[in-house]
């Protein structure tokens, strides 16, 4: 086994040994490669997100909560909008990963420069003031976050947002059952 560029493992076997490799030897090599891969991934900072870091997740949750705050109905943070955005950044929004990294970092830097704390640590009034003062690329990034927050809050819960169909219930829209979820529940007849 050889460690290649960028921490990737390359299995180096002699051509002659490849034909004589038995099941037990294969399992030993496969187990070692799996364990080494797990050790490398354990070096990543603990985060509940697929794409976002823990700090980026906190900042994005605070921004989303400013867009759709909690009132009589739960806001964007409770509805799982950050989960929705994080999942989409690993799929359809993949091209916007760099914009999110840069945008969230710049908003945190602006908060530290103005108030001495990161964005998530500011009170609601300070967060609103900072958002209103955004300009240029930061303002464009914030417009993107608004669009994604709306999609996550009002979209189908199966995509990671709109937890418990909170926005649908708020609007009086009937909650559509997810196909296959209740397949063992038979309809009542004659009742």
Image: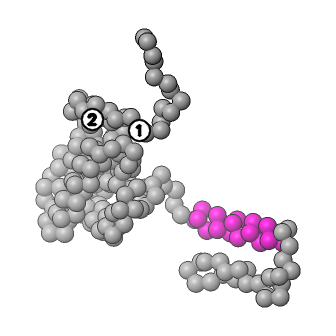
> In this picture, is 110 found above or below 169?
below
Residue 189 in percent (x, y) is at 45, 16
Residue 46 painted magenta: no
Rate crowding at label 1 as few (under 14), some (14 to 19) or many (20 or more) other CA atoms within 10 Å: few
Rate crowding at label 2 as few (under 14), some (14 to 19) or many (20 or more) other CA atoms within 10 Å: some
Task: Name the mark on residue 38.
Answer: none
Instruction: Give left or right: position of 25 versus 148.
Output: right
Secondary structure at badge 2 equals: helix
Q: Quick one: label 2 or label 1, which is nearer the N terminus?
A: 2
> Residue drawn at (28%, 31%), measured in percent from left and top?
174
Looking at the rendering, in which quadrant would you find the N terminus? bottom right
> In this picture, is 91 found above or below 150?
below
Secondary structure at badge 1 equals: loop
> In this picture, is 169 found above or below 119?
above
Residue 40 painted magenta: yes
Residue 6 in percent (x, y) is at 55, 80
Camera-nearest residue between 41 and 189: 189
Camera-nearest residue between 71 and 109: 71
How far apart marks 2 and 1 lie (CA) works out to: 14 Å
Instruction: Give left or right: position of 27 versus 175.
Output: right
What residue would you read off at disc 1? 178
Per the rendered image, the range of residues in magenta is 25-43
> Residue drawn at (67%, 80%), measured in percent from left and top?
10
Quadrant position of residue 148 = bottom left
What residue would you read off at disc 2? 168
Residue 186 in percent (x, y) is at 49, 24
């Amino acid at each position: 086994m050889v460690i290649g560029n960028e921490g990737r493992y390359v299995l180096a076997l002699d051509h002659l040994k490849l034909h004589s490799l038995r099941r037990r030897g294969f399992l030993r090599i496969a187990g070692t490669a799996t364990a080494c891969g797990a050790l490398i991934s354990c070096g990543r900072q603990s985060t509940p997100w697929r794409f976002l870091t823990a700090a980026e997740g906190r900042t994005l949750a605070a921004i989303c909560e400013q867009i759709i705050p909690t009132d009589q109905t739960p806001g964007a943070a409770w509805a799982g909008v950050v989960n929705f955005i994080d999942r989409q950044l690993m799929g359809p929004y993949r091209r916007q990963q760099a914009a999110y990294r840069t945008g969230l970092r710049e908003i945190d830097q602006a908060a530290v420069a103005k108030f001495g704390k990161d964005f998530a640590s500011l009170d609601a009034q300070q967060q609103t003031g900072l958002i209103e003062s955004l300009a240029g690329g930061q303002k464009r990034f914030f417009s993107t976050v608004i669009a994604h927050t709306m999609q996550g809050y009002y979209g189908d819960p199966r995509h990671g947002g709109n937890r418990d169909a909170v926005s649908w219930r708020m609007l009086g829209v009937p909650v559509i059952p997810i196909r296959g979820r209740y397949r063992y529940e038979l309809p009542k007849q004659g009742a």
